[in-house]
Image (tube, helix red, strand yellow):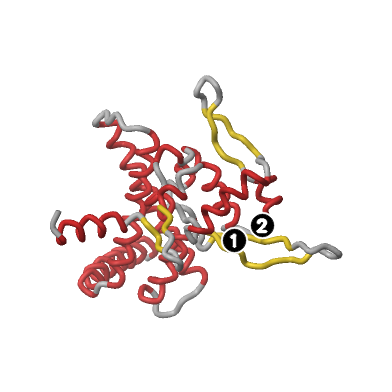
């Protein structure tokens, strides 16, 4: 095999790998390829938790003897510790503080996710067959936080004088655009009788909603689109003013 082919192969392989300081590598999709580890990530994205607390709170999907999906709550600290090691090595989780136990030569570690798993990061890496369908459904339509982030970025370019009321109106508009896209996609699925796995369809809906958010941001930030929006808003305002003039005189 030529050196060029060897180099190309290694570059492709590295796309799915996080490199650690000591030269050790952990495959990210493998780190996320577990319902329990996904559950741990979601728990620790909200608060700092120690091993015992995680073991008590963790809720994940499993299958019974007949292959039916069931919700399981709680696990043993020993089992959770194994999963924490994998997540820590892949840098998806970290120890944020340690507490010493009085009169004992022992410390309790508290863990926190390295980032908030906002759905898109998890879905880009985790195998689809280990992601709970309920989690995918909860991501579509897109949750509140990403919408709020987009609105905060574009609000200053939409309004000269920002107020809470204006931000609320803009947020409602963006959410409506996303919800309309969600409904439109489902209508298309019914119209064309698309036979798509529910998990895959939820993933498609999530990306379509993210696309709407990205397009909205570009509409506001790109001068070319801004001019088109300004023309549209001007026509709407003129029409409203004409309507109120004719109906209040």
Residue at (68, 56) in percent of width and height: 50
The percent coordinates of residue 185 (x first, y second) are: 31, 41
Q: From where the camera sits, is residue 222 visible?
A: yes
The percent coordinates of residue 39 (x first, y second) are: 56, 47
Q: From where the camera sits, is residue 170 visible?
A: no
Q: Which residue is mark 1?
A: 112
The percent coordinates of residue 160 (x first, y second) are: 40, 79
Label annotation for residue 170: none
Name, please, the residue furthest toward the front: 1
In this view, the residue in front, 28 or 200, is 28
| Circle 2 Cα neighbour tier, 10 Å, few/some/many (<14 / 14–19 / ≥20) | many
| Drawn side of residue 135 relative to residue 220, left or right | right
| Drawn side of residue 2 relative to residue 244, left or right | left
Marks 2 and 1, the one that precedes in the sequence:
2
Q: Which residue is mark 2?
A: 49
CB contact under 8 Å: marks 2 and 1: yes
């Amino acid at each position: 095999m030529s050196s060029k082919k060897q180099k190309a192969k290694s570059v492709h392989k590295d796309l799915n790998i996080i490199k650690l300081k000591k030269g050790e590598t952990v495959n990210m999709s493998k780190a996320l390829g577990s319902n329990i580890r996904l559950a741990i990530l979601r728990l620790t994205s909200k608060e700092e938790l120690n091993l015992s607390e995680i073991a008590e709170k963790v809720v994940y999907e499993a299958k019974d003897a007949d292959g039916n999906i069931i919700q399981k709550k709680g696990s043993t600290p020993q089992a959770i510790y194994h999963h924490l090691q994998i997540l820590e090595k892949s840098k998806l989780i970290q120890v944020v503080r340690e507490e010493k136990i009085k009169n004992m030569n022992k410390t309790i570690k508290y863990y926190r996710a390295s980032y908030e798993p906002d759905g898109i990061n998890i879905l880009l890496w985790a195998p689809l067959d280990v992601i709970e369908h309920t989690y995918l459904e909860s991501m579509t339509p897109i949750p509140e936080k990403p919408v709020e982030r987009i609105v905060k970025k574009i609000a200053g370019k939409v309004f000269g004088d920002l107020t809470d009321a204006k931000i609320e109106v803009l947020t409602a508009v963006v959410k409506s655009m996303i919800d309309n896209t969600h409904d439109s996609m489902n209508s298309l699925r019914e119209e064309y009788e698309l036979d798509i796995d529910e998990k895959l369809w939820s993933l498609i809906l999530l990306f379509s909603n993210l696309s709407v958010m990205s397009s909205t941001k570009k509409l506001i930030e790109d001068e070319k689109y801004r001019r088109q929006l300004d023309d549209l808003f001007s026509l709407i305002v003129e029409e409203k003013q004409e309507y109120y003039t004719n109906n209040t005189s």
